[in-house]
Amino acid sequence: MNRTAIKAGLGACVLGASVLIPAHVSAQPDPAPTATGTELADLTVFLDPGHQGSAEGNDLTRQVDDGRGGTKDCQTSGMTSLGGVPEHTINWNVAQLVKSSLETLGASVVQSRQNDTGWGGCVDERARAASESNADVAVSIHADSTASGEDAGKHGFHMIVPTLPIPDEAANAAQSGGGLEASKLMRDAYVADGFVPANYAGVVDGIQTRADVAGPALTKVPLVFVEMGNGSHPEDAAQLESADGQLKHAIAITTGIVTYLLTGSSVGSELDAVQSAAATTEADATTTTAPSSSGSPTTTTTPKAPSAAAAQDTTTTAVTTSASATTTTTTTAPTTTTRALEAATPTTTTPSAPAPAGESTELSRLLETLRPLLEVDGVDGLEDLVNNENLGLVSDLARTLMAMLNDARPN
């Protein structure tokens, strides 16, 4: 088993998440929903790892349709990161991890190019291939660059969306509807996974609107065009170059895809709903006031049973950015998603063995399941992917995804 296969398996493990336990819960849950491998059956994803390994025999400057009545270069060579890694290789590696995770869940995956050594097609050819695949969603995976010496502070991820309307009616319908929705969900998944939206090039809340990118204007299925980070920025480049960083990007991209395909609602929204209900249950208490010896009132709290409101469905719409957050909460009758989340909520407690000093029980349990993977082929560094600081986020995210996978797929 090679290193890539191990990391792909880990990505699927994180997304499958049947072994994860939320960090904010100290109880062992009833048997949690597990992935069956058919959650994305009958769904197709088109992956476009940007650029190509070689342009030999092809003219990159040949003019092709730009989708807006003009022309542009057939293709570009892509950037090279500060550490000397070509963008086409970064894009390819991330795409293969995403492909593996999606196929683990039963999706059919079509790629614009089949290797990282040869030609991958002009931008118009890739858009045509995506459209002809009739994919439920297409994702074009890229990494950005700037003038490293002059723009040292420019960093972060962003999604490129096309200026609307697009002249082609089918492309306009696809990108103004599903494409825009999927792009925002991908942005939310990136933010939820700890990535910072770009602070340059007119990016607003992780979204950049452009009329000069041909792919979205030519593609007739919903398209997400993701720029994972700035390869000219030291921290972004280090993450783009490393296997662990590429895996983290792949998890965010896969999460965005799965969320769009199965729910059309934000992962952040689902997490907020789960955490809000848990917080309400834990914090709900009766407050009484009694006089103190000094004559000033003192307040004591007595826990009480969870209120009926805590059992109701809470639907939260959240768009989180690096600078602000807006949350709207409404209470409705329980939905299938809520019932799935409630079904996965721990209801019994079982003592477990103490965790090593500085390491939570949940983290110990997770790392124990990953240990065999870490020992194969001398793979190291993956312990840092899930740690005490991010375990709660990863666990909650995985738990929510599992509930959605099992009970919230649109009919």
Image (tube, rainbow, N blue to C red):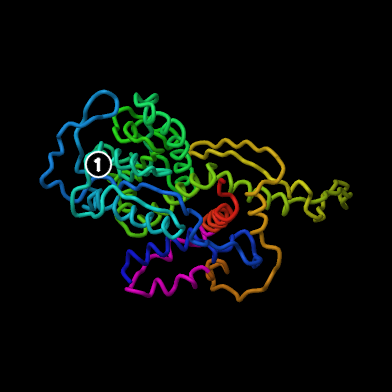
User: Which quadrant, please, contains the N terminus?
Assistant: bottom left
Per the image, the residue denoted by label 1 is 148
Q: Position of residue 71 (x, y in %)?
A: 21, 27
- Asked if residue 209 lies left or right of residue 124, the reply is right
Query: Which picture quadrant has residue 385?
Result: bottom left
Prevailing secondary structure class for the magenta stretch in the rendered image: helix
The quarter of the picture where residue 122 lies is top left
The amino acid on which the numbered mark 1 sits, given as a three-letter code, is: Ser
Determine the residue positioned at 23% across, 53% down: 85
Horizontal side of 334 relative to 169 (left or right) equals right
Q: Is residue 163 above or below residue 182?
A: above
Instruction: Specify whether 68 is left or right of 323.
Output: left
The residue segment tinted magenta is 366-392
* Relative image position of residue 229 (x, y in whole percent): 34, 45
Q: Is residue 361 above or below residue 119?
A: below
Helix, strand or loop at label 1? It is: loop
Which residue does the image show at 46% across and 33% down from the upper left?
177
Q: In the rendering, at what x and y percent does residue 80 appear?
A: 22, 47
Q: Nearer the viewer, residue 310 or 114?
A: 114
Q: Which of these two is toward me, 300 or 240?
A: 240
Question: Which of the two residues, 349 or 270, is positioned nearer the viewer here?
Answer: 270
Q: Is 375 covered by the magenta stretch?
A: yes
Total numbered labels placed on residues in the image: 1
Residue 393 image offset from top left, x and y in percent: 53, 54
Residue found 62% across the figure and 41% down from its top: 316
Is residue 65 in the magenta section? Answer: no
